[in-house]
Image (cartoon, rainbow, N blue to C red):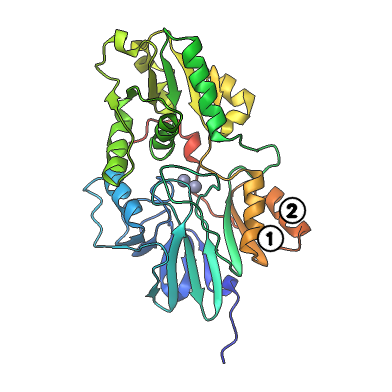
Amino acid sequence: MQAMPHPETWLKVVPQGLYCEPGGFFVDPVTPVDRAVVTHAHSDHARRGHRAVLGSADTLALMRVRLGADDARETEQALAWGEAVTVGDVRVWLQPAGHVLGSAQVALEYLGTRAVVSGDYKRVADPTCAPFEPIGCDVFITEATFALPVFVHPPPEHEIARLLDSVALFSARTHVVGCYALGKCQRLIALLRQAGWDRPIWLHGALLALCAAYEARGVTLGDLRPATGAAKSELAGAIVLAPPAAVTDRWARRLVEPVVAMASGWMRVRQRAKSRGVELPLVISDHADWNELNATLEEVAAPEVWVTHGREEALIHAAERRGIRGRALRLVGYGDEDEAEAVPQ
Ligand SMILES: [Zn+2]
Ligand SMILES: [Zn+2]
């Protein structure tokens, strides 16, 4: 019997990203490669130019919308949750990550060892995507966007109630909520619908295509209308969603005495909200908070955790205190969609 090789010997950090050597593929590569496994459709994880892409059907569909027809891939392979394929010498399967529609964790098995790449994830229920499913493994590779004890996200329903309270109080004004175009926008809409808001929700043009894509994939969002071209009278008392960069720029002049809100995990940091002119900060994040990250380490029960894009040190320290070996993965090229300043495509 062959010795079980430590994942360190077959999963490597290279300039293109995380490389699975015996499979001959990269996970979320940051430059064009021959074979990519993509966790989800956010722009820092799903880049253009790969020859072959494997991912969930929803992720592949959202990539087509985001990257357009000119991103001609030779092959696309969609995997259902839990459906395993062998790539090279590696068994690969996907389980939901609960981050945005289609977002997946990637499980990799090679010669009796199992590594799981979390991608971006969260643990609170999200009406627009399948919930995160913990997978026991030998090495868990986790994101760490909000890996500081100060980041404890309130329940999203609580933040939606604050928004609706403000709408009731300032009923003649427009509430404009800055939100990222893929995931956050559709989640906000779904949360508003759950809270009983059945009036039209008005959208900046940059959000329309991805909302249509969600609806086409079976996520119902209700009455959505383009804000561009709407009469000012229609926008009084209305909720308008726009990319973060648009809520305080020229575009917002069409709104009626706008109350500027922003939905992001970073709204926990008062100074960020202030510096961006946000009057109503809503702490709604698609990333796990400190408690969710730690609870997840417990659940997957991996003796070793590799930590990427975020505050690695704090989570590694917390893991080591519980006897889990920690390692900071120095992957470059991953941002945080909440931070995006530009109007996304
Ligand atoms: Zn993401
Ligand atoms: Zn990310």
Extreme-right residue of the structure: 321
Q: Nearest the camera: 270 or 332? A: 270
Location of residue 152 in the rendering, given as x and y in whole percent from the top left corner: 65, 38
Q: Which residue is mark 2?
A: 317
Q: Nearest the camera: 199 or 233? A: 199
Mark 2 closeness class: few <14, some 14–19, many ≥20 residues within 10 Å: some
Q: Secondary structure at mark 2?
A: helix
Location of residue 181 in the rendering, given as x and y in whole percent from the top left corner: 38, 35
Which residue sits at x=24%, y=62%?
74
Location of residue 22 in the rendering, given as x and y in whole percent from the top left corner: 46, 76
Q: Which mark is residue 326?
A: 1
Mark 2 or mark 1: which comes first in sequence? 2
Indicate the quadrant where residue 320 lies.
Answer: bottom right
Whether residue 271 is visible to the viewer of this picture, yes or no, is yes
Q: How many marks?
A: 2
Q: Which mark is residue 244?
A: none
Whether residues under marks 2 and 1 lie with C-beta atoms below 8 angstroms apart, the answer is yes
Q: Amino acid at mark 1?
A: Gly
Could you tell whether 329 is left or right of 186 in the image? Answer: right
Q: Quadrant of the C terminus?
A: top left
Q: Is residue 220 above or below residue 313?
A: above
